[in-house]
Image (spheres, grey):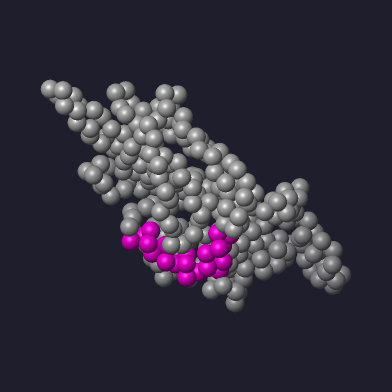
């Protein structure tokens, strides 16, 4: 906010005395307020369109040259949205606008976004989806209207859990940012229900479209209920997802025969942004 006010004050100092006498300060503040109001309306309209799965209006809020930090252009992103809505049409989206920084015809907006849904039944088990992300939207004015031309997800955590897995307190940790070709550890921790055998795997994959299937190697959850895996960040400067897969099984023993039944399963996903050292330092300096 201080940076924004500094821009307004500096702009006011450059204005001619004739305009200064004409209450220029109030004009600039009014201009900023109008832009902020329009930007808030745009982002809230996005959520409204998404909740109604109105694809045409939703995608119209994006600039035709849109390109996000994951390397997805407008065509890629459009196809991704269609895929999600075709699979899950009852997702409830939400947004909280944390800060708006306007500079002439450009704007940077910090938001917290949520997604929640009851998932289609898999193996006759009810499922739930919960997701939360901290993101930055980059907007510009196009023919007098604000459009999103890029965005960056800073942090993102998503869970898709079915059956008894819905009631687990699951922790999946990994670094938010990492340099390319650098080792990092992902840790999964949860306590399975009494009398249940838990298996799990941790995999990673680059954020891309179409998304590739991550290779899974399931292991029995150790006695301390903690599973760890070491990864090496890709050298392509592509952001990554760490995906934990969980399975819960119960053993029924009758007349010396053992029958295993699936009682729950699911996925926990977290984002790891792969940032070159120079870019990471620039971002830290900009914050200062």
- Nearer to us in this view, 48 or 16: 48
Q: Is residue 154 visible?
A: no
Q: Tally the marks.
A: 0
Q: Does the stretch in magenta take in 70? A: yes
The residue lying at 55 percent from left, 68 percent from top is 66
From the top left corner, tell me how far across and down residue 159 is, in percent.
Answer: 41, 43
Q: Is residue 34 magenta?
A: no
- Residue found farthest to the bottom: 143
* Vertical arrangement, residue 191 with respect to residue 156, above or below: above
Q: Is residue 237 left or right of residue 121?
A: right
Would residue 262 be visible to someone looking at this image? yes
Image-quadrant location for residue 70: bottom right
- Counting from the top left corner in percent of width and height, residue 228 is at 50, 34
Find residue 236 and report its horizontal and vertical position in percent.
Answer: 59, 58
Highlighted magenta segment, given as a residue range: 66-86
Q: Is residue 206 above or below residue 160?
A: below
Locate residue 276, reporting x and y percent: 67, 53
Looking at the image, residue 44 sits to the left or right of residue 85; the answer is: right
The residue lying at 85 percent from left, 63 percent from top is 13
């Amino acid at each position: 906010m201080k940076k924004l006010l500094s821009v307004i004050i500096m702009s006011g100092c450059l204005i001619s005395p004739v305009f200064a006498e004409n209450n220029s300060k109030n004009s600039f503040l009014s201009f900023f307020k109008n832009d902020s109001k329009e930007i808030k309306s745009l982002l809230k309209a996005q959520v409204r369109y998404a909740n109604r799965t109105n694809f045409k209006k939703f995608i119209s809020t994006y600039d035709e040259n849109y390109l996000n930090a994951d390397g997805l252009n407008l065509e890629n992103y459009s196809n991704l949205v269609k895929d999600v809505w075709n699979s899950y049409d009852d997702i409830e989206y939400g947004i909280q606008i944390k800060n708006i920084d306007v500079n002439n015809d450009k704007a940077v907006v910090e938001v917290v976004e949520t997604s929640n849904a009851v998932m289609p039944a898999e193996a006759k088990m009810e499922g739930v989806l919960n997701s939360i992300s901290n993101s930055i939207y980059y907007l510009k004015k196009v023919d007098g209207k604000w459009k999103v031309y890029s965005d960056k997800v800073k942090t993102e955590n998503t869970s898709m859990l079915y059956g008894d897995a819905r009631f687990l307190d699951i922790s999946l940790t990994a670094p938010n940012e990492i340099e390319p070709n650098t080792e990092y550890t992902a840790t999964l921790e949860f306590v399975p229900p009494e009398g249940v055998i838990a298996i799990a795997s941790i995999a990673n994959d680059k954020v891309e479209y179409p998304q590739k299937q991550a290779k899974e190697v399931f292991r029995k959850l150790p006695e301390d209920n903690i599973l760890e895996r070491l990864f090496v960040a890709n050298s392509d400067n592509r952001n990554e997802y760490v995906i934990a897969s969980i399975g819960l099984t119960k053993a029924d023993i009758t007349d010396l025969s053992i029958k295993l039944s699936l009682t729950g399963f699911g996925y926990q996903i977290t984002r790891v942004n792969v940032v070159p050292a120079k870019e990471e330092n620039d971002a830290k300096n900009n914050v200062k």
